[in-house]
Image (cartoon, rainbow, N blue to C red):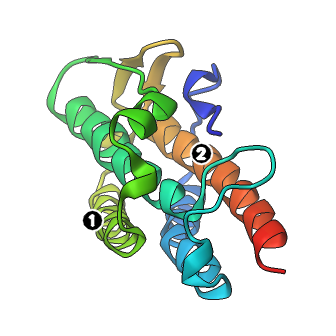
Amino acid sequence: MCKTERTSHVNDSTGTGDFAAALEKLGSMPAQLAKVAAALQPSKWKMRTSDGSFSLTEHACHLRDIEIEGYRARLERILGETKPALPDLDGAALARARDYHRQDFGKAQAVFAAVRADLLQRLGGLSAEERHRTGILEGAGEITIEGLVAKMLEHDGEHRAELEQLQRELGL
């Protein structure tokens, strides 16, 4: 499960082209989730891999909640406050408390896709100066908005790998 929340390399200064490429890559994650769903029978959407990683439904719920309560909230606080303290989120605790396994994949995926699209539009409209605003991320230290985007990419990468494993194990 997700391990990116406590990494320490959070100030990733990217050029405008790199930032745009990062946003484009982030924009492909909802489609990746939908692609895996299409490859699996709906009866398998709540099945986990042999190592106990998230089911497809749990991935969708987790991505939705982290997008809303993590990345979007952090972005807005960094833009609206001076060096805000940004709390860490425990994805495993959220999954247990919210009983992701019993939620609806389609609804979670749709909300994740909509929130991601909105967040990418917001990020795409930021000036270079705004992208360098900072906050203090619990467990990681100072982070710029560009660093936040780098963390989003890293987080998506972990989920892409786990989704590939899920598809390999359950898609047969």
Q: Looking at the picture, does residue 118 appear above or below residue 6?
A: below
Q: Give the left or right position of residue 45, taking residue 85 as reference.
A: right
- Is residue 14 in view? no
Q: Quadrant of the N terminus?
A: top right
Discs 1/2, front: 2
Q: Nearer the viewer, residue 167 or 46?
A: 46
The residue under the point 53% across, 56% down is 59
Residue sticking out furthest to the left: 80
**Quarter of the rendering containing residue 61:** bottom left
Q: Residue at x 63, y 62 (%)?
A: 47
Q: Secondary structure at mark 1?
A: helix
The amino acid type found where label 2 is placed reads His
Q: The C terminus is located in which quarter?
A: bottom right
Measured as percent of width and height from the top left, residue 57 is found at 49, 62
Question: Is residue 98 found left or right of 39 in the rendered image?
Answer: left
Residue 118's tag is 1
**Amino acid type for the residue under numbered disc 1:** Asp
Q: Position of residue 120 (x, y in %)?
A: 36, 63
- Please give the label number shown on residue 155: 2
Residue 163 seen from this side: yes
1 or 2: tag closer to the N-terminus = 1
